[in-house]
Amino acid sequence: MSVLLFFGVANLSFGALRGPEGRAASHFAQLMSQKILIVDDEADVVDIVSMNLKAAGYTVVSADNGATGLAKARAELPALIILDLMLPQMSGLEICKALDKEPTTRSIPVIMLTAKAEEVDKIVGLELGADDYITKPFSPRELVLRVKSVLRRGSDKVETEEKIVIGELELDHARHEVTIQGKPVELTATEFKLLALLMERRGRVQGRDRLLNDVWGYESVIDTRTVDTHVRRLREKLGALANYIETVRGVGYRISENIGVGGAEPSVERTVS
């Protein structure tokens, strides 16, 4: 009975609800509007992931091979994709490459869920644009928490000035846009948040653990080398301005405070004595 009543509340006009009940119903309806695509050829994995995501309030669609998964990603434009690497017809890495080439899909966050646990596999996956990497066997509860964390990265609004300009680099929070000399730079939600934090904290060194917590929302759940991989990918996208992001060896990263209009030439690596 309680389940039927809950769904009944979710279908009412939330303007008529007040207090905790209204907030809970509104939050559930918001989650229901977020569609998660699962691409995995193991039926038992799809079943358990679907069950847990639906219990958390998400809408779920699935595909059991790479080609169908890519087609559904293009057609459904889900809020997030949970992707296996070893798939029939088309591998997970090939799907990532295809998604990244298309303007309508390149910003869709991807969590890789795979039995490939070697470090090189994780690095390759993250460098191809995955926002997180989980190895099988896995905890369904942890997976749902990771999904929530990744989705939060794209929706969180940082309380700061709408535009930040450092040299030739401009970040616009309102438009969720980064430009170099007026030309747009395509970033994932995670890359955008990482760059925004570094720009907002210009001149201050950000340790890997701090970035892992502030950008990914994790304490030490994933290896801090994930941060290094994303910084490397971010530098590649910044092109000639890659050296705006300095590495402070043994500590972390920062954006140099010595960059002036027209772009100074900070060193990419500094050593702390």
Image (cartoon, helix red, strand yellow):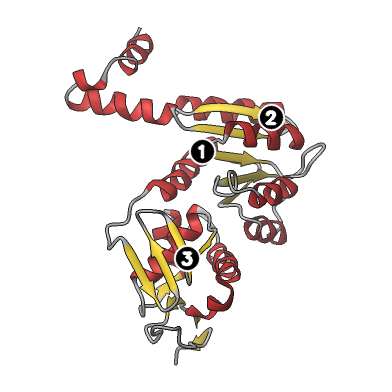
Q: Nearer the viewer, residue 105 or 246?
A: 105
Residue type at numbered disc 3: Thr
| Element marked by disc 1 | loop
User: Residue 212: image x %, image y %?
Assistant: 45, 61
Placement of 133 over or under 19, stated as above or below:
below
Residue 257 vs residue 190: left or right? left
- Residue for point 51% across, 88% down: 267
Residue pushed farthest left?
18
Report the residue marked by disc 1.
Answer: 79
Residue pushed farthest front?
182
| Element marked by disc 2 | strand
Q: Nearer the viewer, residue 95 or 229?
A: 95
User: Residue 213: image x %, image y %?
Assistant: 41, 59
User: Residue 27: image x %, image y %?
Assistant: 33, 30
| Element marked by disc 3 | strand
**Badge count:** 3
Measure how far apart labels 1 and 2 are at the Cα level: 15 Å
- Residue for point 17% across, 23% down: 18
Measure how far apart labels 3 and 1 are at the Cα level: 24 Å
Report the residue marked by disc 3.
Answer: 179
Report the residue marked by disc 2.
Answer: 63
Residue pushed farthest right?
89
- Which numbered disc flags the more N-terminal residue, 1 or 2? 2
Callout in the foreground (3, 1): 3
Say if residue 212 shows up in the picture.
no
Measure how far apart labels 3 and 2 are at the Cα level: 36 Å
Say if residue 70 shows up in the picture.
yes
